Amino acid sequence: MTAQLEYPGVQDDNALLSIQGLWKVFGPKAQRVPRRPELASLDRAALYSQTGCTAAVRDLSFDVAPGEVFVVMGLSGSGKSTLVRCLTRLIEPTAGSLIFEGEDLRAADEKRLRALRRSKFSMVFQHFGLLPHRKVIDNVSYGLEIRGESKPDRRRRAQEVIDLVGLAGNENLYPEQLSGGMQQRVGLARALANDPDVLLFDEPFSALDPLIRREMQTEVVRLHREVGKTMVFITHDLSEALKLGDRILLMRDGAAVQFGTGDELVGAPADDYVREFVRDVQRADVLTLRWIVREPRPEEPLDGPELGPDVLVREATRLVLESDRPVKVVSNGTLLGVIGDEEILAVVAPPHKKPV
Ligand SMILES: Nc1ncnc2c1ncn2[C@@H]1O[C@H](COP(=O)(O)OP(=O)(O)OP(=O)(O)O)[C@@H](O)[C@H]1O
């Protein structure tokens, strides 16, 4: 059995954020590029040489569901930052539609956009963007101050989110007295203080040491579990995308290469580009039994142990290898198939190519 090969970017009517045919083209007479198919279809180099334009975002359509962590991943220059800035019109899209909570964002005037950015969206940046002359608590409550909330309310809310992100005790320090990881916790607390509907992260952990980075990823997973906010998370790091993303959009040269869950990207890469991207992933940590289950052979006993299809291969390895009977994969009482040593070993210990 194979899982769904193509995962549609567009999901359902209950989307929080719905993007259709979004383009951002930089350069002279940018509007003509999405309008004219003979220009829209040119690759990056040809488009630039014929028009002097770069399509940083190319005809993207996808929905973000409420409560989802939607990860946008791609190499440097693939258009991630431009895309996330287009979502709140910090960068003006060249074409396409943006619907947020049923409202047409492209029709919103400046005043409405400012109000939305203040109350509905919060951004967390790579370089923290903290105010150096303000203490932690005042950095965290800054957005609430702009919103005109009273001092006691600001303090209460700021303290709440400071506790939530593990910064208690540091309220009166200045940003320069904190490590990079702690500063980014302040960035997180500031973003959460506003109680936004969507948190937008633009490579927030790229400047951090690997260990601290992993710690912060775990922190985001925990915060998401606790506060359940919708998140759009930009990263160039595949392991970060796999750790955080409910769904992942992989971009290349401004366009979508593949939408999918982590296991779909790893288990059914859409093309050689994606395959190369995911090549070094520990597949057993990402693929579930759903990806390796097979039909039982006629002579095989069907009284082995049972597991569900969403169990990770890594988690099932020991049981399968120790069992003298094939493990049954069962979903809601229905037998989907079986798994034996062969299927497990193909993922856990794939045969290495001989050196030439
Ligand atoms: N203001 C601009 N004018 C012209 N071209 C731009 C502008 N901003 C971005 N670009 C181009 O658009 C493309 C996408 O850039 P973008 O910064 O969105 O990519 P990215 O994936 O976020 O990369 P990085 O991780 O390096 O920031 C790049 O080719 C970039 O050079």
Image (tube, rainbow, N blue to C red):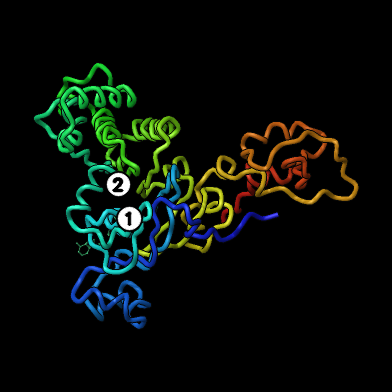
Q: Is mark 1 within 8 Å of ligand 1?
A: yes
Which x, y percent locates residue 345?
A: 68, 43
Residue pictured at 34% horizontal, 44% vertical: 198
**Label 2: which residue?**
202
Label 2: element kind: strand
Q: Rounded to the nearest whole Å, what is the CA distance between mark 1 and mark 2?
A: 8 Å
- In the rendered view, tell whether residue 276 sits above or below residue 37: above
- Asked if residue 64 lies left or right of residue 301, the reply is left
Q: Between disc 1 and disc 2, whose residue precedes? A: 1
Label 1: element kind: helix
Q: Which mark is residue 80?
A: 1
How would you rate the neighbour count of disc 1 (Cα within 10 Å): few for under 14, some for 14-19, many for 20 or more? many
Q: Which mark is residue 195?
A: none
Residue pictured at 61% horizontal, 37% vertical: 314
Q: At label 1, which amino acid type do we have?
A: Lys
Residue pictured at 31% horizontal, 40% vertical: 196
- Residue, far right: 299
How would you rate the neighbour count of disc 2 (Cα within 10 Å): few for under 14, some for 14-19, many for 20 or more? many
Q: Is mark 2 within 8 Å of ligand 1?
A: yes
Residue pictured at 59% horizontal, 59% vertical: 5
Q: Quadrant of the C terminus?
A: bottom right
For residue 44, what is the image quadrant?
Answer: bottom left
Q: At label 2, which amino acid type do we have?
A: Asp
